[in-house]
Image: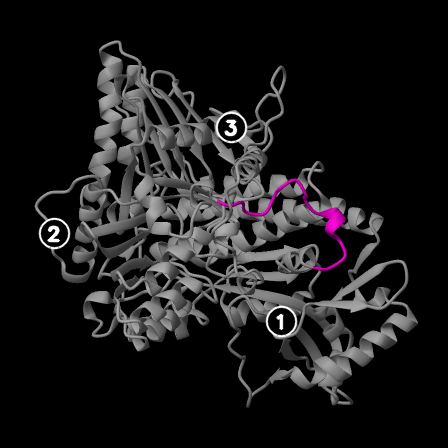
Amino acid sequence: MDFAKEEYYTNRELSWLLFDRRVLGEAKDKSNPLFERLKFLSITASNLDEFFMIRVASLKSMADAGYKKKDISGMTVKEQLVKVAEETHRLVEQQYNTYNRSLMPQLAENGIRIIRHHEDLSAEEGAYVDRYFMEDVYPVLTPMAVDSSRPFPLIRNRSLNLGALMKKKNGGEELDFAMVQVPSVLSRLVNIPGENQTKIILLEEVIERNIDKLFLNYDIVCSYPFRVMRDSDLTIEEDEAADLLQEIEKQLKKRQWGEVIRLEVEAGIDEKLLGFLREELGIEKEAIYAINGPLDLTFLMKMYGMDGFDHLKEHGYLPPQPVPELMQGSDVFAAIREGDILMHHPYQTFEPVVNFIRQAAKDPDVLAIKQTLYRVSGNSPIVAALAQAADNGKQVSVLVELKARFDEENNIVWAKKLEKAGCHVIYGLVGLKTHSKITLVVRREEDGIRRYVHLGTGNYNNTTAKLYTDVGLFTCSEEIGEDATAVFNMLSGYSEPRNWNKLSLAPLWLKDRFLYLIRRETEYAGRGREAHIIAKINSLCDKDIIQALYEASAAGVRIELIVRGICCLRTGVKGVSENITVRSIVGNFLEHARIFYFHNDGKPEYYCSSADWMPRNLERRVEILFPVEKPRLQQKLRDILECQLKDTVKASELRPDGSYEKPDRRGRETFNAQLHFCMEARESAHSEEENGNRRVFVPETRHETETEESGSRGGMA
């Protein structure tokens, strides 16, 4: 049977848009607390921004270059652009229907009013807003007029602006264009004092109300907000770059001025003003989005952070709990020697990983620390510990991936800091992104050298570790230690060992390993044996993997997939995918862990990885797949998978027609996997405390107030 037929596959971009719709579904869901709904709507806007800046921009570049090859679903680039435009316009309309028809009335019922138009202000409120403008806003603004001596200005990517048409006082009917950028250094939320109600007006409305004060010699005919989105995908000629760091720094400066791919304007904008913007920006009609509401809904995340509204937020989720195995004694190395430790974040705290590096930095018996860093937080305690380790005379080697999208600038800062501290820093590999999450600590002990290893599915980022679900493994397995040494030798010196023990690496043979594991289940099914695969991943779009899954399904393998985002596989195709189910979980935390189970004829194998089933992960990145072999830890992974497979609250199931629907709850218990994991972590920690154990790792409060970095997003991670 031909499993490569185009009709068996879904387009990647359209599948991603379905994911953002699932996030939007959380904003629509009235069972969620009001401020949680605001948060989810903000996330859909942030996700869509990145989708345009990277994915739509990439499609447009390919179309402009005359790219003819079809994708796995049989769509040309131009066909994808047309369909994506249709779906994104529809999605934006639904975003604002949710905002205007559901969330705004709910906010009003709870004593919160967002003033839509400055004309709606009372005289007293208007006077306050005008004073605020003159005292706090006016000094920051830079009004820009356009005429023969002043060309149309460069408009920064994602900046919010006000465009105006005006005419000279007593100077005839000729219209001139002018604009002012809404300053991002000021809060977009302007609180208006009042009793019994919270009133908010957005900064652009404050400026629009007072825009005549910026152009004193003109009469303002009209003014409207607008926002542009630009191509932000960096083009780095790595083979020709003498210094990768300098090349990326140079390209970062260009990111703000890429080709305009999207223009957002307020619905009802003056046609002459819109025509002027279209002509100057060189943008096509289908790339213009007329918005029925405030542009850029990410301001709702700022609202979520406002004080005084905890009663409108989710309270069922708990802060990270201690890791039971690391609650006895003060020696992390002794705890790891007692047995492998599996951690489930964010339900269990990420602090043991931070303290693993801190303790290694201070321990006189530690000789070397080696680590890969893809995304780190804005005030990273891990980077500080690595710098301290180098200062203490340890051999410290760090691979800082400079090409981590939207974290390039942050990573450049950390790379320079680590170098100054005496660390050996590698700036990634030419042509590849190093996405693996691995730390190696080499320690001198009484019986010789011992290697301690941490492997994870998520970044070494103490901030996102509170928001993303991931698993991490501590081990001092001799075989994994040898492999870890080999990994770092490859990264630093291109030295590949003859033999590997436990780890599988991309782009070398990880894809082949996955294909082997899938085909092994296929062979067992062909012999009439029980065969079963469970995979929890973020994205699935690799054609070879999907084709192998189809072959396995056709042979009778039961396949259960938990795919948060993109899924190009179709379910329910007769003779092809009847034995495959796909579900997506969108909840309070971002599902990020990659966990794999293979029945293996009754001898189950479990793996975790930094890699998704995508061509970029399997062919163009350095990724690691690591086994979890201790039975008690395997059971822990099995419990995670089974809980997610029975979720009836935050899960959506992929239907044969390509849509996603909530599970049928009839006759089934209501079960929220993420909430269950929170309670489970608390019970486990409390059980240890009741047995007289004490917590070893106490989080330092100075790290608790860090905000989520721009490179750590809810949807595209």
At a point 51% along the width and 41% down the height, the residue shown is 19
At a point 70% along the width and 36% down the height, the residue shown is 31
Which circle marks residue 161 in the picture? 1
Q: Earlier in the sequence, mark 1 or mark 3?
A: 1
Find numbered disc 1 in the image and state the secondary structure of the residue it sits on.
Answer: strand
At a point 73% along the width and 51% down the height, the residue shown is 310
Front in this rendered view, residue 400 or 7: 400
Q: Verify whether residue 602 appears in magenta.
A: no
362 versus 72 height, above or below:
below
Asked where in the image residue 651 lies, by quadrant, the reply is: top right
Compute the Cα span from label 1 to label 2.
53 Å
- Residue carrying label 3: 653
- Residue 395 horizontal/vertical position (percent): 23, 66
User: Residues at badges 2 and 3 in contact (C-beta under 8 Å)?
Assistant: no
Quadrant of the drawing holding the N terminus? top left
Find numbered disc 2 in the image and state the secondary structure of the residue it sits on.
Answer: loop
In the image, farthest residue toward the top = 528
Q: Residues within 10 Å of mark 1 (few under 14, many from 20)?
A: many
Compute the Cα span from label 1 to label 3.
41 Å
- Residue 419 horizontal/vertical position (percent): 30, 74
Q: How many marks?
A: 3
Region of the chain picked out in magenta, as a range: 306-322
- Residue carrying label 2: 496
Q: Earlier in the sequence, mark 2 or mark 3?
A: 2
Locate residue 25 relative to residue 128 in the image: left or right. left
Front in this rendered view, residue 525 or 82: 525
The kind of residue on which mark 3 rests is Glu
The kind of residue on which mark 2 rests is Glu
Tell which tag, 2 or 3, sits nearer the viewer: 2
Q: Residues within 10 Å of mark 3 (few under 14, many from 20)?
A: many
Locate residue 659 relative to residue 495 in the image: left or right. right
Compute the Cα span from label 2 to label 3.
42 Å
